[in-house]
Structures are given as C-alpha cells and as structure tokens.
Image (spheres, helix red, strand yellow):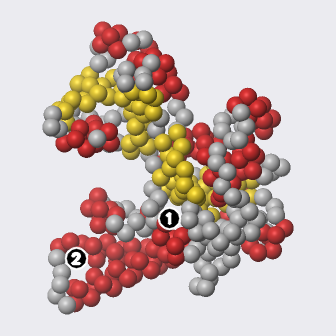
Amino acid sequence: MNIGIIGLPKAGKTTIFNALTGLEAEVAEYSSGKVEPNVAVVDVGDERVDRLSAMYQPRKTIYATTEFVDFVAASGSRNESGGIFSGEGIALVKNADALLVVLRNFKNATLSETWGAVNPVRDLGEIESELILADQVIAERRLERLEGDRKRGRKSPQSQAEEVVMQRVVTQLDGGGCIRDLTLSAEEEALLSGFRFLTAKPVLVVLNSDEDNYGTGAAVVAELETHYPVIEFAGNFEMELSRLDPEDAAAFMTDMGITESARTRLTGFAYRLLGYISFFTVGEDEVRAWTIRNGENAQEAAGTIHSDLAKGFIRAECFGYQELLDAGSEAAVKQKGHFRLEGKEYPVKDGDILHIRFNV
C-alpha cells in the first residue's frame, strides 16, 4: 500500500511524515526548494503477527508494510498558472494508491500572512479544485484525440468504449465532481486505470492540530467528514513522540489522551477505509503478514506471495487466526474440524492463515 501525503505548502506534511515513519526529514517554515519526495516504508504493527511469531518461533518475522511518500514538490507560493502544485509534483502524486491530505489547523503568523487564517475546510476545497484541474487537462486532451481518430475513421470497439467513458469523466470534472464518485463498470475502470487520475484515488484527511487545540475541533471535523474520512493528529507532538523510547512515549501519550501512536492509528484507519485486509503465512522459516484488498480470492492472494503460486494454484489450506489461538496448535485446529481446503474463488478473510498448494 502506497500512501501519498499532499497538502498546501507548510501545512505540516513533512511533520506528519516524520511522525508516521520516525524519520527526521527537514521541516522548515520557508520553502527549501527541494523537489524529490521523502519516502519511507514502515511496518504495520499487528499483534496477531506478534502472537503467531511467539507460537511458531520462526527464523524471520515479517510484518505487512505501508509506503509513505511526502510530496514536497508543492511550491512555497503559487506557480505561474495560479496553482499550488508544480508539474513535477502532480506527476509524482499519480503513482500513489491513495492520498493523505494534510490540512493546517494550527496558528502561525507567517503562514497566515501568505495563506490566510486557519481554515481547513477552505484549504480542502482549494486542494480538491487543483486535483480536478489536473485531471481535466488529461481527460480533455485524451477525449480530443479519441474524437479526432473517430472522425478520421480510425476507431475500434475499445476506442469507442473509451470515448464514451471519457465523455462522462469530462462532464463530471467540468461540473466540479471527482471521478471516484462516478459509478463505473469493471470494464470502464479498466479503460481509465492507465491514466491514474488523481480524483479517482481514495482520500483520507489528516487534521494537523497543535497541542493547545487538539481534540477541540469537533465542528471542523464534522464538516470535513461530509467530504472524506478524517483523523486528527497533534503533528509536532506526534513527531517528537516518535523519537522517544517506548516508556517515555507511553507517558506523554497518556497525558495527551492518545492511546496509540500516529503510525498505528493511521495504518489501521487506512486499512479499514481503503478496504485492505491481512492474511498470514506461518512456519518455522517465516511468519509473515500479506496485504490484499477485501474481497480478493485465494488465487489472487497466492499471486501476492508469488506469481508462480497463482499460475499453478491447486488448493489453499486454510484456517483462521482466532481458530488457531483458541485451539492452541495446528493439530488442535484439525481435531476441531476447522482446517479447510479452499479453491481458487474462496474469498480470503482478514486473519486467514493460508498455505498454498501449487504445481508449476
């Protein structure tokens, strides 16, 4: 899972990135001129992996991971066309699976002079307008090309189908709507997938507050939630917290009324809202968590492990994490009749433990 962090300049994107990753990427009040994003891959904490590792005592324990990309290519002021993102920034954001929009909810006199008083709802609207504009440029150019090819007699069933869905996309964007709000068939989604439209990506919002106003903005959160799922962080506090040892961090979290770290809260939040689940493979060599989308079947899960397992898929030996925990061992799982053999189309459930039988 790849999550791209975006927002207006100096909204605290890199602060949130540092809080999530424990890194120390440069945070400054003024633009550094840097274009390259900050990138980090972090483990997704999961107590189920910890318990499975304690049970099997494997040589390796591997958690699911999330890649966070802090797109620092947003300019410190508006670009020549009046926009807030550079061309390089937009191009990089396209590679993200989902967008994490950071909204400023802290006071800073210098930032207020440039960007106005704190107003997260206004800022979200400005960012969304920018993403819509970026998609409009691509969609309109593609539609013009498809219409031109049709008029010159160069057409195919696929190009005709693409022209129809692209017309819908342009109409949606021209009306100020996002592509993710269109009802599309699987075929239409496939036709659009290569364009990596920004407004088709899932969005999560982080309200970046300071310690003084953290937890007091229920009305703002409620208004933002009419658009997207929202989670509030005290960004600077969370960044400092990520650099402390576990005992000190726990004490400070208690003082702030925070029960889990920013990373744990955000990754759990993202998994639920973006429709990801984890399944496990276990053994003496390795205990490992794997990430798939909710609803994917056993053959698709096998392909996540290795493409050869999907190609030569025969059966999946399957039982649940909780069934194993309750039984105490694999042998006891079998005795209780919870050990199953599932076919290709079996919809994998969160917490399933799989062993793939295959033949290549």
Circle 1: element type: helix
Q: Is residue 213 left or right of residue 164?
A: right
Residue 16 shows up from this direction: no
Residue type at the position of mark 2: Gln
* Residue at 64% over, 44% down: 22
Q: Is residue 338 left or right of residue 344?
A: right
Residue 209 lies, with reference to residue 158, above or below; the image says above
Residue 276 lies, with reference to residue 98, above or below; the image says above
Residue type at the position of mark 1: Val
Q: Which residue is mark 1?
A: 93
Mark linked to residue 160: 2
Indicate the position of residue 9 as horizontal and vertical percent values. Answer: 67, 68
Residue 326 lies, with reference to residue 114, above or below; the image says above
Of all residues, the one furthest to the bottom in this rendering is 152
Q: Is residue 208 left or right of residue 107?
A: left
| Quarter of the image where one finds residue 204 | bottom right
In three-dimensional space, the C-alpha distance between marks 2 and 1, rounded to whole angstroms, equals 29 Å
Mark linked to residue 85: none
